[in-house]
Amino acid sequence: MPTTYLLTGCANGIGRHMARVFYNQGHHVVATDIDVVGLATLTADWDQTRVLTLPLDVRSTASWQAVIDQTLTRFGRVDVGLNIAGVVHVGYAAEFNPADVDLVVDVNLKGVILGTRLMAAQMVKQGGGQIINIASLAGVAPIQGLSLYSATKFAVRGFSLAAAGELRKQGVQVSVVCPDLVDTNMLTAQIDHPEAALSFSGGRILTVQDVERAIVRDAIQHRKLEVLIPTSRGWLGKVGNLFPALSFSITDLLRKKGLKEQAVWQATRKNTAGNITLNK
């Protein structure tokens, strides 16, 4: 019997890739996004008996409830929900404006909380399910230059771990996945901003396939509570949290490394016309 997957942020990036993965596995897919044009290009040639594409503003309870209701009408249940939709804002704490705060907090945090709340309630009624929330390694170790984004991802991670404890005896598994920088539009949004240099200071930039393997293998098959991608960098961030002031001493070195990596990506993303090529 096919599993019903409900995903947010499916117009591009990780969400788009994972929707295609689950569809290709033969499951029912509810693909949502505020960008309905992007959704249409994803599912145009899919078997429409197995897919439901719906507009969703993750900041809105009413929008979420409409998606849940239509999913139940079509497929009868929500087996696995993935809160993937997110936005990034580059800038320092003394510089971003209140509108930036509202957008990033509402999409990245409020959207995950609302989605978890409504999907969890349905899963409890139906006797079980799994919710996978996408946080970030920026929610494990604070990233200067992305302080607003980092704050929301710390909150998503904390909320997910707490919700996992609350829901586990009711048959609902909650997992939180924390990837390093991934080659999606979020990378493109940071590529020309030196403030985001620390994002590029790790090792290899992740691909959506890296995130796919972690979600499918670690979160879904092994039902891990927390998934760090890569594990080594995630644990390094956790150790750094034990001595946060000491991490400042290596920030300048990491920033220099990140700036060099940014320059490489800037060069590779320039097409022959000199434009930035977006990766969706």
Image (tube, rainbow, N blue to C red):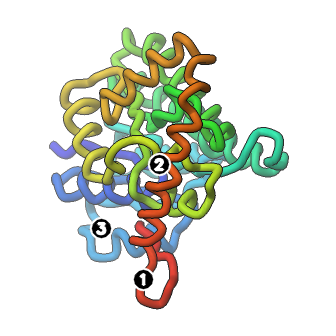
Q: Amino acid at mark 2?
A: Phe
Label 3: which secondary element? loop
- Note whether residue 156 is visible: no
In the picture, residue 261 is in which quadrant?
Answer: bottom left
> Spatial distance from mark 3 to mark 2, Cα to Cα?
39 Å
Q: Which mark is residue 200?
A: 2
Q: Quadrant of the C terminus?
A: bottom left
111 lies left or right of 225: right
Residue most extreme to the bottom: 273
Q: Nearer the viewer, residue 242 or 55?
A: 242
* Residue at 53%, 46% in the rendered image: 256
Q: Residues within 10 Å of mark 1 (few under 14, many from 20)?
A: few
User: Which comes sooner in the sequence, label 1 or label 3?
Assistant: 3
Q: How far across and down, in percent of the image, does residue 153 sit?
A: 56, 33
* For the residues bearing labels 3 and 2, Cβ distance under 8 angstroms: no
Query: Which residue carries the number 1 mark?
Result: 271
Q: Residues within 10 Å of mark 2 (few under 14, many from 20)?
A: many
Q: Amino acid at mark 3?
A: Gln
User: Which comes sooner in the sequence, label 1 or label 2?
Assistant: 2
Query: Which residue carries the number 3 mark?
Result: 48
- Note whether residue 240 is visible: yes
Q: Nearer the viewer, residue 183 or 169?
A: 183
